[in-house]
Structure formats: structure tokens, C-alpha cells
Image (tube, rainbow, N blue to C red):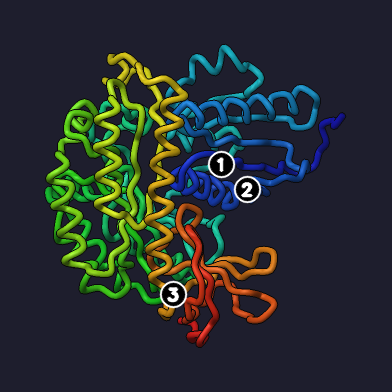
Amino acid sequence: MKTKTLKPNKVNVVTLGCSKNLVDSENLITQLQANEIDVVHDSTEDDANIVVVNTCGFIDLAKEESVNTILNFAAIKKQGGIEKLYVTGCLSQRYKDDLEKEIPEVDAYFGTLELPGLLEKFNADYQHELLGTRTITTPQHYAYLKISEGCNRTCSFCAIPLMRGKHISRTIDSLVAEAKNLAKYGVKEVMLIAQELTYYGLDLYKKRALSELLDALCEVEGIEWIRLHYAYPSKFPIDILETMAKQPKVCNYLDIPLQHANDAVLERMRRQITQKEQRELIAAARKIVPDIAIRTTMLVGFPGETEEEFQDLCDFIVDMKFDRLGVFQYSHEEDTSGYLLQDDVDAETKAERANIIMDIQRDISYAKNDSRIGQKLKVLIDRKESQYFVGRTEFDSPEVDNEVLIDAKKHFVRLGDFVEVDIVDAQEFDLYGEPVEVQSQS
């Protein structure tokens, strides 16, 4: 059993959930380091005496993972393995009172916007001059850039506004400054994230300003790829697609979660869009940016979803042939308007429907990947894993999308480099390639 020592504190920041949480953790790490506090991220070593768990509270599985992680570190603290345990993030924001009662071993709980209060526990000052500067925990060549906080949408299944509050855009100048700092440290790809990208600027500039932001970011020297995540489909600003078509740095990639396709389900979800409008949007995107890769997310098992409504969704996916697709099973979230509906689709049916959709997408993905054989594609090399160098095209985002595998026994490429790759084989979710020419680094 450990005993307290006079050694300086060492903090382990543990991040759960989405890339937006990761950026929050990176900002926390930056502030702690600026206060000369030793800090590590997601460390598996046991040499940290303080742990901060940044939680996710999006759906039941995420909440369960967060609670189990807190309980694990609470047990370690009880055994003397750590001295202090703090919890922050979405779960803590939403269920702070309950968590304080159920897991009193935690020294303090903080919400999503309470970073200064958390820093006080370390006798650390919140340094405003660090805004736009942060330590990244991703590979050095890519980073996430959070352009806004919160969400003004009222989707009936979503608890995000309860945890993150109303939409607040960051200024274009501040985002450009942060992108320049990231580029200075070797970042070549920035992924724009928010709860809802297309709402960007309405609060600050009284207009949707994502296109203006993209134009400004394209001027940042060293940044070669700019990727768009989490775009809301209703009233989608078409000028974003026009900017994508004219700006080589903006990846031909759009993550646009549609959630469903049946009009009755979309209405119950309060998505403010119809299937016809969704089809028109996808058609417009493919017309303006012919080589665009569209990623979407679907939600199955929403209250009242009938077999006919689910089949409508399946038919839509078959017709649309999305390049990338993920699926969630509905989670009945208290305090959302959907919670007033009866959660009448059983867990087994939800899982079965999710599997059916992924089976459909597997075939679509294989056909699209097979069509890439013989093409030469620009690939960013992320890592080496087993016998392969693993990279991505502009059509793929880290961790969630397809990857390009290069046999490390036959070829050598440097991590973080852009490489022209000849695609020689394909599987459902992977491409295999051979490097043609390593491009000079920017």
C-alpha cells in the first residue's frame, strides 16, 4: 500500500467519450503544465498520485463506462494507490448530486465549464493567455479543433444541451491563432468539431460563418487537411460545399449525422427535416463535390419505430450508399422530450436492427473500396501496427473510418508524412496499398 510522500504531484488525466472531451482534457493538461505540474494522459502506469476522470454521459453505455471507471479509481484510492480523485465532464455535469451520494470517495466533482474551479484544487491559476495554445494527445500530425461549445437544437433523443448548454461560437481570429500554434508544432490535419458545425457564427456574427472560417484556416501555413465533423442536415448552408469544392485544403469529407430516414420517426425525433430533403441534400453535395465522402450516423430503436419504419431506413441506406456509416441503439435519456415516449423497442430488437444496418453498410463499403483498386491516393501515415504502416486518405477520419495498410516488411514510410499510394487490394473497411512517392514535408 502506498503512503503519502513529499514528492511533487503527478496527475493522470483519463479521458472518456468523444473528441470534444479529448480537447477539454488537452486544455486541462496545458493549464496544469503551465503551472509546472507533472501530468500524463491515459497512463497505464501507477506512478500518478492524483487522477482526473473526464467523463462522458451521452448514452447508457457511455455512462456505464464512466461510472465503472470512477469506481475503479475510487477502489484504488481506498487501497492507498492514489491520494486524490477528481471527476469532470458530461456525466459529472448532469449527475453531480447523485454521484456525490453514490461515490463519496471522489474528492470533488466538476461540470463541463468548471475548469478554473478544478485548477484551484491544484493551487493552479487559470492562465487566459494560454487560450489557443494546447498540448495535444493525438499523434503530432493531426489534432481536433473545437470551434464552438453547446447546442441550440432540440432533438428529442439527445441530452447534450443539458450537459453542454447553449451554442457558443469561438471567434474566427481565435481559431486561426490556435491553428497556427498547432501547425507550429507539426500538425498537418485539423478536424473541426462541435456539437453542431453548421450553426457556427450565428451567435457572434448573426449569420452562418463556417465558410468564412474555412477560408481563413486555409491560409494557415503548414495545415494541409481540414476536415468537417458533426454537421446538422436541416437548413444546411450549401456554401460550405462550394468552399469545399474550391479549397484544396478542405477534405472532400462531410460527417453529417442523419439519425433516420422515415418521416414519422424524424418528426418524433424533432429533426426538422424530411427524407426527401435529406435526399436532396446528399444529391447536392455529390453534385457540387463529385468525389465527396459522406459519413453519417443512424439511430435505431427510437420509441415507436415499427418494422415498416425500420425497413424504410434500410431502403434509404441502400439507395444512398453512404461512404461511411455508424449506428447507435436508442438510449432512453431522462429530461429529454423523447423520455416522455414509451421505450417500446426491446433491447434484442435494437441490437438486431443495428446489426442489419451494419451488414448493409459492410457490402456498400466493400463495393466502394473495391472501386478504389488501381487508384493512386494521397495518404497520411498515422502509425505502425504489427506488420503494417497504417494511414488514411482525405476520405477518412481517425479511429472511425477506413484505413490504408502498407506492408512494413516491403516498404518504409515515415509517420506523419503524406505518401502517394497505389491501391492494390481492398476489404470491407480497409484498403491495401504500395507507396509510389513520399511527398516532401511542408
Q: CA distance from mark 2 to mark 1?
A: 8 Å
Any part of residue 91 in sight: yes
Q: Are marks 2 and 1 in contact (CB under 8 Å)?
A: yes
> Which residue sits furthest right?
1
Sequence-wise, which precedes: disc 1 or disc 3?
A: 1
Is 120 positioned to the left or the right of 347 in the image? Answer: right
Residue type marked 3? Ile
Any part of residue 185 in sight: no
Residue labelled with disc 1: 15
| Residue under the point 27% across and 34% down | 166
Is 114 positioned to the left or the right of 216 in the image? Answer: right
For the residue pair 327 and 308, the one nearer the viewer reads as 308
Which of pointers 1 and 3 indicates the residue nearer the eye?
3
Is 64 positioned to the left or the right of 375 in the image? Answer: right
Residue labelled with disc 2: 41
Q: CA distance from mark 2 to mark 3?
A: 39 Å
Q: Residues within 10 Å of mark 2 (few under 14, many from 20)?
A: some
| Residue under the point 43% across and 69% down | 393
Instruction: Specify the quadrant of the image occupied by residue 191.
Output: bottom left
Residue labelled with disc 3: 373
Sequence-wise, which precedes: disc 2 or disc 3?
A: 2
Q: Residue 352: image x %, image y %? A: 44, 32
Instruction: Specify the quadrant of the image occupied by residue 407.
Output: bottom right
Which of pointers 2 and 3 indicates the residue nearer the eye?
3
